[in-house]
Image (cartoon, helix red, strand yellow):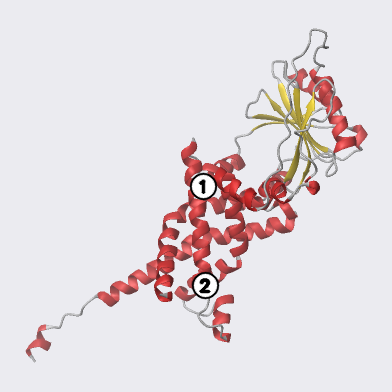
Amino acid sequence: MKSVLLKINAWLHLWLGLVSGIIVFILSITACVLVFEHDIKDLVFNYISVDEQTADAQLPPSVIHQKIKEFYPDKEVSSLWYYGLDKSIKASIDHSDTLLYVNPYTGQILAEVDHEDIFHFMDEGHRHLWIEGKLGRQIVGWGTFVFFLVTLSGVILWWPKRWTKRAAKQSFTINWKAKLKRINYDLHNVLGFYSLLLALLMALTGLIMAFPWMRKSVMWLSGGMPPRPKVEKVEPALTDPVLQDALVVADKIWYKVRTEIASLNKEAVIIHIPEEGEEMIYACTDMHSGRWRDLRFDRNTIDLLPNSQKPVREAGTAEWISRSNYALHTGFIGGMWTKILYFIASLICASLPITGFYVWWGKKKKTKKKGKIRRPKVEEICS
C-alpha cells in the first residue's frame, strides 16, 4: 500500500510539475526582479532621493498642489505620497498612469514619469501573465495552487527511505564531481529542499491574494477577523456648515497623521485630495516593512473614523496575517536580508521546472533505450 501511494505521489509530482512549469518559471523570474524594485529605482533614478532636511522644512500638501498647478493648470492632483525626509513626493494626477516626482522642500518638479515602465510590465506578468481580465488572474491563481501541491509532494520524494550517513549527504549536498545528469538531479532535489519553506510561504500568501475562499479559510483558522465598525452616514441638515476646502483638509490631515497618529516611519504619509462632495477622506501611514495602516477621516471634524485600522502591533492573529500577507509574500517584512533570501528562493523556484524537466527527459530516453529489442543479424541466424 505504501509503495502504491509513493508511486501515485511521484506521478502527481511529475505531471503537475510539467503542467505548471511555465507559469512557475514566469512568476519566479518576475518575483526576482520585483523584490528589489524600489532598491533598483533608488540607484538608477536621480529623482527618487533628495537631500534630507528637517520635518518642519517639508512643504504641506496645499503648497505642493499649488506648485504642480503652476506647470499643469489643467490637471487635477488626486493624491500625494510622502515617502520620507530623504525621498521625493510622488503625485498622482487625473487618476492616470502619469506620475510626478516633486522635491518636498522646494516644490520643484523633478520628473514626469509614465507608470508603464519595466517594473510595471514585470508586475503585470506576475499578477496575470499579461492576460487582461479575470482569465490571467485565474491561471496564475490555479498555477500557484498546483505549485503548492507539487512542493508538498516533492518533500515526500526527497525524504530518504533510510537516514544513513550516505543518504543524508545525498539529500543535503550537491555532488559537483558527478556526471551532468546527477548534478542536475541534485540541483532539483537539494535546492528544492532548501527553498521549501519560503516556496510554501510565497505560494500560500499568493493563494490568499488570488482566492477569497483561501483568504476566508486562513482567517477562520487563525481566529477570525474582528468585526468592522459601521460608520453611519448622517444626512446633513440645512444649518450644517459646508464642507471644508479640500486643500485645507489635506493639510490638517497630513499634520495630524505625522504628529499624533503615526508610530512607524512617521514622515511617510499618503494624502488623498478630497473631491467635491466627498465626506470621508483617506490617508495612509505606518508604511514600514511592506505593511501599512489605512486611515479614514471625517472631512469637517478631521476626526479619525471607527473604520480606520489600528496599529499592527495591536492586531489579533488573523488581522496581523491579513495585514502582513503582502510583506510575507514579497519578502519586505524583514528588510534587506529577507529580500535577499526571497530572491534566492525565487531563483531556485524558477530553476525547478527546468531541472525537473531534464530529470524526466533523461528517464524517458533511458526507458526508450531499454525498450528496444535487438534483432539478430542474418549471419547469426544461419550459423
Indicate the quadrant containing the N terminus: top left, top right, bottom left or bottom right: bottom left
Q: Say whether residue 227 is left or right of residue 355.
A: right
- Under mark 2, the amino acid is Trp
Tell me the quarter of the picture where residue 54 sits.
top right
Query: Could you tell me residue 242's position as x and y percent?
Result: 81, 12
Residue drawn at point x = 57 percent, y = 81 percent: 168
Residue drawn at point x = 58 percent, y = 86 percent: 165
- Under mark 1, the amino acid is Gly
Residue 315 visible here: yes
Q: Say whether residue 16 is left or right of residue 35.
A: left
Q: Crowding at label 2, few (<14), some or many (≥20) Cα neighbours within 10 Å?
A: some
Query: Could you tell me residue 210's position as x and y percent?
Result: 55, 45
Query: From the viewer's perspective, is residue 349 above or below residue 299?
Result: below
Which residue carries the number 1 mark? 141
Q: Crowding at label 1, few (<14), some or many (≥20) Cα neighbours within 10 Å?
A: many
Query: Could you tell me residue 382's position as x and y percent?
Result: 7, 89
Query: Could you tell me residue 21's position as x and y percent?
Result: 46, 56
Indicate the quadrant containing the C terminus: top left, top right, bottom left or bottom right: bottom left
Q: Which mark is residue 158?
A: 2
Residue drawn at point x = 59 percent, y = 76 percent: 172
